Image: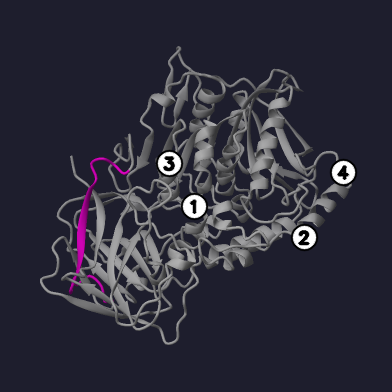
Amino acid sequence: MLHKTVSFRRTTLALILIGVLVLPLLAPAAAQDDDRVSSLGKYRGYSEPLYDDYVRISQYVPVRDGTRLAVDIFRPVADGVPVDDPLPVIWTHHRYHRADTDENGRVYSILDSVPALETLIEYGYVVAAVDVRGGGASFGTRPGEFTRIEAQDAYDMTEWFAEQPWCDGNIGMYGISYLGITQYMAASTRPPHLKAIFPQMAMFDMYSFVYPGGVFRDDFLTQWGFRTRMLDKSWPAAPVDDDPDLRLLEQAIEEHQDNVNIYTLALDQPYRDSTSGPANTMLHFEWSPASYIEEINQSGVAIYHLAGWYDMYPRAALTWFNNLTVPQKIIVTYWSHSGSGGFNLMTEHLRWFDYWLKDIDNGIMDEPPITYFVMGAPDGERWRTAEQWPLPDEQPTVYYFQPGPSDSIASVNDGLLGTEPPASAGFDPYTVDYSTTTGQTTRWTDGYGGGYGYPDMVTNDQKGLTYTTPPLDVDTEITGHPVAHLWISADAEDADVYVYLEEVEADGTSTYITEGVLRASHRATSEPPFAYMGLPYHRSFEEDIAPLTPGEPVELLIDLLPTSNIFDAGHRIRITITGADADNYATLGLDPPPTISLYLGGEKSSSVTLPVIPAE
């Protein structure tokens, strides 16, 4: 399993909160003998480094309602003087401080946390970072996250950059996570001068992130909400240049004191159509990037999406790709939220922005639009390309849950997983164990700076229902979206159901691959309002909620986050089902815990459909 053990770069809390991926320091190679190369992670001969220094300027810029936003501007320097030639600007709308200071007054800017951004400056770009309103050194108060007024601020800042004498009118954006989401929101306002963006690991639909399957993502909202409140109210950002006595910074932080508590607000919005405020606003729609697909398509902004199989948002990025008609590319890596190892991402930024902001025809748009990493594939075969998603050669294969034993684990039932349905109908009973957990260093904790690294899943599996194949005869590639089709009943009015896909090695070690979750009362499916790749869509309006009738079977459709993994010959595929993830979600916490019956065989045969890619 060494080839599947991903080494992720560990980042400090400060670097995570700065909100931009720590990029490898590799710069594009210089041209040799007019040899020009432009391909994934490789670039030379199309543009050359022009500058070897830069100057940082920090100031306030008022937006349309007069609120002053703090901005850092990094301009190339030639002979000790900022370059007068107008250049493209690439900026980020920053949620986590565009810059900080230490106790000695030293400023730590975005180039200290992401030094690879200097490559863009060297190649003739102006780089900028803007504190969001109500955050950092910017004035204003935050009524929430991803608001329309914040998106309007992005429009105003984009057009302000375009008006500056050192800008040639071509604007791009960069950044990860919140800083990726703000790029989609900026594009939705259609700034005339915004030409291209590079959002990394960014959300699509707000409700499905805050309440996946109707279950509150408690730990993430608790930790992220606490950290952002401290950043806004208690941890001062760096002042702008014209504020040496910090008077303006103190005034700005005073305005931050009225920022909304996002955790409390989210907890009070349990349904997709929950409303808030005197205007009865449905925040899961108004603040969700998915609500603005049409506007983004109308913008014409070119988009290079980036996702990671172990990040929070791989399904989100692929859903973006399937809904947008603008010029676009997508790359799906093997990373978690803080990962960046083994790939020259800054080269991809430079190729993208050279093409769209400098009109350099480097061939990037002649390449297949999809690039993805297959975990466990041999060297030289891990990066693959495609024209569409899901992959056209995908073979959805039904694996049925069967009575055991599999002789692979001492779980509650030790069931089998196979492509033939059970010979007779039955069920496996399971009394929910509220101590089950995927741990405290998951794809979700990594999203707020809590670290990444799943444990051997055996301890968790032993407390749940497991269904495991015999050892595989051949390597088996699964690339796409697994979907669990479960028939259950319970002795309570509700239950949470967690489904995990794992790879089991010959020694019994079980590796987490992906997961899905659904609260049974949210089981109703609806026609999605956007292209959803054939996946089950749970609308989760308040009127859709249907309690269980004790003892009455119901059908649950649960899609797992997409993945691409080769399950080695001799290893096993396992599906584990539990009723809680204690360290990551808010459980129902019923007393006594409910007993769930999972049905096998007959007309109510539980199964999982895996997207198998046939071997060549």
Task: Please name the residue shown 29% across and 42% down the image.
Answer: 391
CA separation in Å, label 2 and label 4: 22 Å
Q: In the rendered image, which residue does mark 3 sit on?
A: 323
The local secondary structure at tag 3 comes to: helix
| 1 or 2: tag closer to the N-terminus | 1
The local secondary structure at tag 2 comes to: loop
Q: What residue span does the magenta drawing correspond to?
A: 390-411
| 3 or 2: tag closer to the N-terminus | 2
Relative side of 535 to 273, left or right: left
CA separation in Å, label 3 and label 4: 47 Å
CA separation in Å, label 1 and label 4: 42 Å
Locate residue 242: give its quadrant.
top right
The local secondary structure at tag 1 comes to: loop
Task: Please name the residue shown 14% across and 55% down the image.
Answer: 473
The local secondary structure at tag 4 comes to: loop
Relative side of 285 to 309, left or right: right
Query: Residue 129: x percent and y percent?
Result: 67, 39
